[in-house]
Image (cartoon, rainbow, N blue to C red):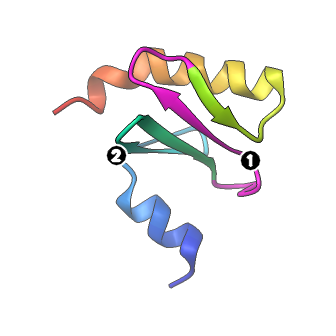
């Protein structure tokens, strides 16, 4: 099994090709179709780290805010 498959299998939620996995700072987000594009989003929806451009990062935050209730325990 490759690394991307493992990340997808362990993700808390996948939305439109983005895998969201909980971490200490919030959620790690990986673009499954383009794994060089990743972010860390805080629990309140702030981008803490990213390799995404501003438009893609904005899309990820929007997906996060609309779906975070499905990731909460």
Q: Secondary structure at mark 2?
A: loop
Q: Does the segment drawn in magenta span residue 49?
A: no
Q: Main secondary structure of the magenta part?
A: loop
Q: Does the segment drawn in magenta span residue 41?
A: yes
Q: Are marks 1 and 2 in contact (CB under 8 Å)?
A: no
Give the residue furthest to the bottom. 1
At horizontal 61% and vertical 45% (from top left) the residue drawn is: 17
At horizontal 28% and vertical 28% (from top left) the residue drawn is: 70
What label sits on residue 48 in the rendered view? none
Q: Secondary structure at mark 1?
A: loop
Q: Quadrant of residue 4?
A: bottom right
Magenta residues span 32-46
Q: Which residue is mark 1?
A: 37
Q: Which residue is mark 2?
A: 12
Circle count: 2
Q: Is 18 left or right of 31, judged from the image as shown?
A: left
What is the distance, in whole Å, between disc 1 and disc 2 at their CAs?
18 Å
43 w.r.t. 9: above or below? above
- Residue 19 in the image: state x and y as whole percent: 51, 47
- Residue 66 in the image: state x and y as whole percent: 45, 15
Q: Is 44 left or right of 19, judged from the image as shown?
A: left
9 w.r.t. 13: above or below? below
- Residue 73 in the image: state x and y as whole percent: 15, 33
């Amino acid at each position: 099994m490759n690394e991307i498959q493992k990340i997808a299998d362990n993700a808390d939620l996948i939305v439109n090709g983005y895998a969201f996995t909980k971490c200490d700072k919030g959620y790690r987000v990986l673009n499954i179709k383009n794994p060089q594009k990743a972010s860390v989003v805080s629990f309140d929806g702030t981008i803490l780290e990213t390799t995404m451009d501003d438009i893609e990062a904005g899309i990820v935050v929007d997906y996060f805010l609309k779906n975070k209730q499905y990731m909460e325990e």
